[in-house]
Amino acid sequence: MSSEIEKLFTFVEKLVDSDARKVFEALYEAGEELSEADIATKTGLKLNVVRRALNSMAEKGLVVYRRQKHPQKNKLVFYWRINYEGLPSIIESRKRAAHEKLRTLLEKEESVHYYVCPRDGTRYTFEEALDHEFICPRCGSMLVLDEERELRIQILKQYIKMLEDELGGAKAS
């Protein structure tokens, strides 16, 4: 399995859950429409779990379905497939949202100085630290200036650059 496909499966798992990943993998491997019952058989998941995963993925636009009346049972059968046409825009919109969140975090990280509790790692703004007289309200330890601030800023900038490169250099979302 290629790393791109594995990334797609991981994306589905993070966006929905591990059951959805299994369902998505079954649809991918089949390469065609599958009924809910077929998916349940292929994945070993219960039918209600399959339906929940499919509905969650459909809400996010990852899969689409068509309904067809079953000839003998006189009930509707849903046939599901991956929404290949919509996947690129879904992935791009998630990247744009992540890009915006990272830019917001970067702006905050660059504009605010934090103090941290050496015991539990809780971070406090300068104002919060001042209010507590630079003593951790949880454990009573002396708060120290966050020395990892520059590293955090550098990491955020790297992730932002990576997303901008993937989005075609779009600096603003």
Image: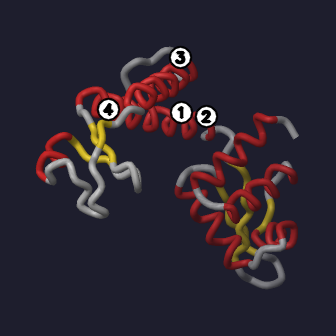
What amino acid is labelled 3 in the image?
Answer: Gly
Q: Comparing marks 4 and 2, which lies closer to the viewer? A: 4
Residue at image mark 3? 168
Compared with residue 33, is residue 86 higher up or lower down, i.e. above or below?
above
Q: Residue at x 88, y 40 (%)?
A: 1
Q: Residues within 10 Å of mark 2 (few under 14, many from 20)?
A: few
Label 4: state its secondary structure: helix
**Mark 4 touches mark 3? (CB < 8 Å):** no
The CA distance from mark 4 to mark 3 is 25 Å
Q: Comparing marks 4 and 3, which lies closer to the viewer? A: 4
Residue at image mark 4? 109
The CA distance from mark 4 to mark 2 is 31 Å
- Foreground residue, 69 or 37? 37
Earlier sequence position, callout 3 versus callout 1: 1
Judge whether residue 5 can be spotted in this image: yes
Residue 110 percent location from the top left of the image: 29, 26
Residue 23 percent location from the top left of the image: 75, 61
Q: Which mark is on residue 76? A: none
Label 2: state its secondary structure: helix
What amino acid is labelled 1 in the image?
Answer: Glu
Residue at image mark 2? 88
Which residue reaches farthest top?
169
Residue at image mark 1? 92
